[in-house]
Image (cartoon, rainbow, N blue to C red):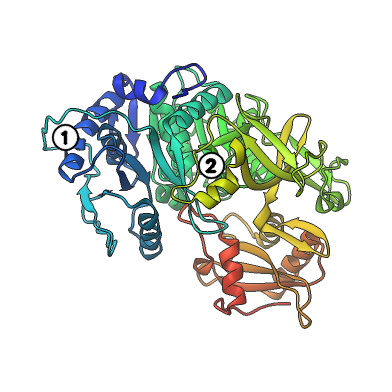
Amino acid sequence: MSLAPDGADLLAQALDAPSTFSGVTVDGGGASSWSALVARGRRRAAALHAAGVQPGDRVLVTLPTSLGFVEGLIACWASGAVPVPLPQASGARAGAIAARIGHVARIARPRAVLLAPNDDIDLGAHKVSLVTIDETHATPSTTDATPPRSLPDVAFIQFTSGSTGDPRGVVVTRAALNAQLGQLHAGMGVLPTDAAVSWLPLFHDMGLVGGLLLPFAYGLPVTLLSPLSFLLRPARWLQAISRSRATLSAAPSSAYALCAAKARAADLEGVDLSCWRVALDGAEAVRPEAIDAFCARMAPYGFRAGAFKPAYGLAESTLAVTMTPRGRGARVLDVDKVALAAGALVPCAAGAPGATRVVSSGPPVPGATVRVVDDAEVAVPDGVIGNLRVRSPALGAGYLDDDESSVAAFAQGELVTGDVGAIVDGELYVTGRTKDLIVLRGRKVCAEDVEAAVEAALRIDEAHRPPVALAFAEDADATVGERVVVLIGMHGRATLDAERQAHALAAAREAAGAAEVHLVPVPASSLPRTTSGKLRRTEARRQWLAGEIEGAGVA
């Protein structure tokens, strides 16, 4: 099998000779060296053996952020099994998560499920063994001497978020994982002295590969926080970076914006972010306003704008495809809005009338290439927006048990990403997803741009949680014609007064270039999301057209 760019099987090396000097610290949940985690994980494999797990079998890993999650992964590999990371079916969204797990089980046909104590999963007709992994780092009671089995060729199966359709299982081979780890190492300039912090979900590609497996492969210390811990108090992420003197940490733009808006001065007292040299920004659209707000808010605490590292990636390529050069910070391009809607990035003066900003996601990581093509698959010139195609040794081997989608997406070794963007000066500018484009009278508008404009118009101050906007195009008919529908998710008992509604409507019309915009306030909890928190615009549009969304509209 092909290995990482330097020829090393990084995963096998990490399992055979794990670091004894560094490891995992779970905020509020204990700490352990990598070597101790590997030893316990190998012993936990006995429970999988007892459950009848054979080499090549799939095992669902539905554990919280914990040392037990790491041990569960290692137990799968030590058993020769293929882990399928999934969210834990608990909390306020347990029902939706259980439905996702059931969907995955129908596709993956697992032999066993690893779950936390007191959790229970009903997979109906799917006959599987439920194996409990304690969240603590206590030594497993079993001492089964079953010899370890060979590592599987498939490192794990990563189910996509489902933001534009049903989740699909990307088959990530060990070769692809090793290649990606090497690409991340080179692109981020990882040093032996680095340390990481992550609150990202471990069932998500950025949390799993970037937040956990990269430190594991290179023997770096990592501090893990639960996603809920971050959401309840975003400053905990920054406190953890300061406390552990972390140099590497990643998050989507929305998380940086949340920190800028919600981190209280009292929570930041004594925080020193001067150690943070790589602040990766990815997993969703990179927003220039989020970068600006975070840099301004955190500069007094030692954060350097040059640490920002916007990136582009997707589960089908294991994680990263492009990332900006080290130490440069974000490159923001001012472009003409009309030209952007027409399909081109045309630079203009900053702050000029009709200008908007787009952020570079950088050049491809080592070994990867990105092509931009039109709908006829013909390459377009630089600066012209088109469909993104990716080649990389980190590409997955296709979608699990979905030959039709695999052939369509991984045609001839080149990934059809479903994203659109342009190349300028060798760097990629992602402008949206094909399925999330709003097309009005021949103009193409990114739904996220409309949403960002509405949210900015509705933002009051740091003390109020801003509404969440979700935009899509409504089918044209003789009565309504072409228009944009914007669902405005309101938190708690918050309401919209007439003045704020007018501001939001004007902002939406300007962003969409459309006179016909329909604003619909709804409870924020009713907006359909993936398990990783991404808005499901396609599902929201389906619900709207089916009359399943209730709200008082404002035309």
**Horizontal arrangement in the rendering, residue 454 relative to residue 112 (left or right):** right
Q: Amino acid at mark 2?
A: Glu
Q: Is residue 507 visible?
A: no
Q: Is residue 515 left or right of residue 78?
A: right
| Secondary element type, mark 1 | loop
User: Mark 1 sits on what residue?
Assistant: 139
189, 108: nearer the viewer: 108
Q: Which residue is denoted by mark 2 in the rendering?
A: 316
Q: Residue at x 62, y 76 (%)?
A: 545
Q: Position of residue 520 (x, y in %)?
A: 64, 73
Residue 235, which numbered label?
none
- The kind of residue on which mark 1 rests is Thr
- Report how far apart the C-alphas of labels 2 and 1 lie in the structure: 36 Å
**How many dots with numbers?**
2
Quadrant hosting residue 201? top left
Q: The N terminus lies in which quarter of the figure?
A: top left
8 w.r.t. 312: above or below:
above
